Amino acid sequence: MRLQVARLAELPGSGTDTVHGAIADQLASQARRLDDVQTRIVRLADALRRDLQRVVDGRDADEPSINGILHNTAPTLDLLAARRTELHRSLTDLVEVYKGLPPFTPAPVTAEATTARQRAASTRAPRRGPTETSSTTSTPANTARARAR
C-alpha cells in the first residue's frame, strides 16, 4: 500500500483539477480520518489501561464508580476499531485506484496561458507614480545635471 512519497501533497497531480488530483484529495481526506480514529483509539485505550491498573493495584475501591470500571469504554473501542478497519480498507482501495491511473502528465502550457501569466506578472510589478522619477530618466533637469558633472 505504498505510494513512494513522504507526503500525500507530493503525489504527481496532487492539487490539480484532474483525476489524479481528485484521488489525491480523497487519499488525504481518508488518511486524516484514519489518523483521527487511531488517535481516539489510543487515548481511549490509555484511559482504560489506567482504570484497569487501578484495579490491579487495588485502588479501585478508593474511587467507586456507579457506571462500572469500564463505563462505556468497551463498546466505544469496538466501534472505533470497526471504523478504523473500514477506513483502512477504503484507504487501501484508493491507493490501488491511484496506482492504476496512467502516469500523470501536466497539461501543456499554451500560448494563451503564457500571455495571461505575463499580464499578471506585469500588473504585480511596482509602478512609479508621476512624481517619482528615476535619476536616470531623461529630463531637461537631469540632462543639465549630467553635463555639469
Image (spheres, rainbow, N blue to C red):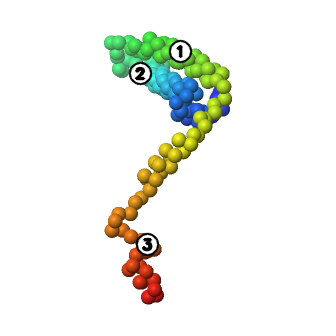
| CA distance for labels 2 and 1 | 37 Å
Q: Earlier in the sequence, mark 2 or mark 1?
A: 2
Q: CA distance from mark 2 to mark 3?
A: 87 Å
Q: Are marks 3 and 1 in contact (CB under 8 Å)?
A: no
Q: Residue furthest front?
A: 140
Q: Earlier in the sequence, mark 3 or mark 1?
A: 1
* Residue at numbered disc 3: 137
Closer to the eye: label 2 or 1: 1
Q: Nearer the viewer, residue 45 or 112?
A: 112
Nearer-N-terminus badge (2/3): 2
Q: Is residue 91 left or right of residue 47?
A: right
Residue pointed to by mark 2: 59
Q: How many marks?
A: 3
Q: Where's residue 76, x and y in %? A: 43, 14
Tell me the residue at 43%/74% (across/down). 138
Q: Residues within 10 Å of mark 3 (few under 14, many from 20)?
A: few
Task: State the SS at label 1.
Answer: helix
Q: Residues within 10 Å of mark 2 (few under 14, many from 20)?
A: few
Left or right of residue 12: residue 50:
left
Residue that carries the numbered disc 1 in the rendered image: 86
Is the C-beta separation of discs 2 and 3 under 8 Å? no
Label 1 environment density (alpha carbons within 10 Å; few <14, some 14–19, many ≥20): few
Q: Secondary structure at mark 2?
A: loop
Q: Nearer the viewer, residue 97 or 121?
A: 121
Q: Which one is nearer the viewer's eye here, 65 or 7?
A: 7
**Residue 48: percent from left, percent from top:** 45, 20
Q: Residue at x 49, y 15 (%)?
A: 83
Q: Is residue 96 left or right of residue 129?
A: right
Residue 138 makes an appearance in the image: yes
Residue mark closest to the camera, 2 vs 3: 3
